[in-house]
Amino acid sequence: MKRFEWFDPATVEEALARLGKGALPKAGGVDLADRLEEGLDAPSRIVNLRRVAGLDVLREREGALDLGPLVTLARLADDGAVRARWPALAEAALRAATPNVRNQATVGGNLLQRPRCGYFRQADFPCRRKGGTTCFALEGRNAYHAVLANDPCAIVHPSDAATALVAYRATAEIAGSRGRRTLPVEDLFVLPEEDVTREHRVAPDELLVGLRVPAPAAGAGSAYVRIVERESADWPLAAVAAVVETAAGRCERASIVLGAAAPIPWRAREAEVVLAGQVVDARTASLAARAALAGARPLSENGYKVRILEVAVKRAVLAAAGVKA
């Protein structure tokens, strides 16, 4: 492993001053440690964010949730207010990884982690995401890869928390030397067709410094459904976060987001349209599920994921609407 400088800033400004070419930020360090071990990164400097004041806030303010990027997944999953008002987010944090990892991994790191594609993670494969000319998954082993927006790169977004945050219409605050900006978490992520080498819009000289999750609307319910091969600890085969607002027995607005389906948390707008104005029941939930996957383009080994994702959508919609399956 290449030698590097270690820097422990106390403020966001100090951290930003040390970022840039050759530098990498570290939050919990789970993904960073993997990347260093796998030879994906060889930084000249690591900027440790764990001592930066104000990045671990977790509080309700004016009905909304302020969430710092250094909040651990374990703390987020266990927080009483989050479990009561944003249960899909708490469940997403709870289902990620193992207890030991959740105690160390942070929300910010979970959102901004790099893909877990086996071709990307192995130095022997110069894939498109690493600046090469080939996505080896498109013609290779692809049982766990994307079924939506899977060209020119078939990764799936690895973050459980991101799926739920997009469903809740959360916003992200990003700080840089030119000031601060805010954007919807849904717009934080980058599709391969836009830039195959990037997953998000946080520049190398910027930091994700905060997240804000709006207050749930009256009559809103939410759910997070995750389907895995091994319940003990595994990356999801399918994940869905659903927020459903109902009035007089009908859906007024829905937000349905698929995880493990596409290179970004995938907003299933077609499914949301199907539910609008309808009584949510098994029939309408099934129609929404089919609409969510209508544009799927499965690869040679992952066609099974289409059906699993449809099942997850149906379960999440019914649970969010408080309807027994």
Image (spheres, rainbow, N blue to C red):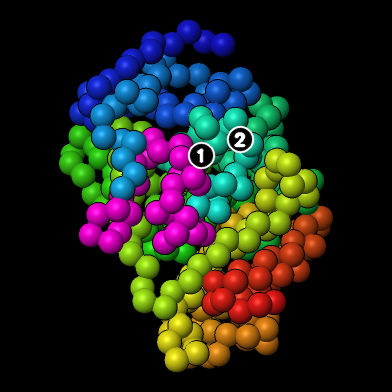
Residue 42 in picture, x, y percent from top left? 50, 19
Left or right: 181 in relation to 103:
left
Q: Nearer the viewer, residue 21 or 264?
A: 264
**Which span of residues is magenta-colored?**
60-89
- Residue drawn where x is 38% and y is 13% of the image: 6
* Kind of residue sitting beneath label 2: Pro
Q: Is residue 74 visible?
A: yes
Q: Do the residues labelled 2 and 1 touch (CB within 8 Å)?
A: yes
Look at the numbered disc 2 and give the secondary structure of its residue. Answer: helix
Above or below residue 220? Residue 33 is above
Residue 227 in picture, x, y percent from top left? 71, 56
Whole-Å distance between the Cαs marked 2 and 1? Answer: 7 Å
Q: Quadrant of residue 268?
A: bottom right
Read off the residue under disc 2: 99
User: From the image, which quarter does the N terminus lie in?
Assistant: top right
User: From the image, which quarter does the C terminus lie in?
Assistant: bottom right
Above or below residue 320? Residue 23 is above
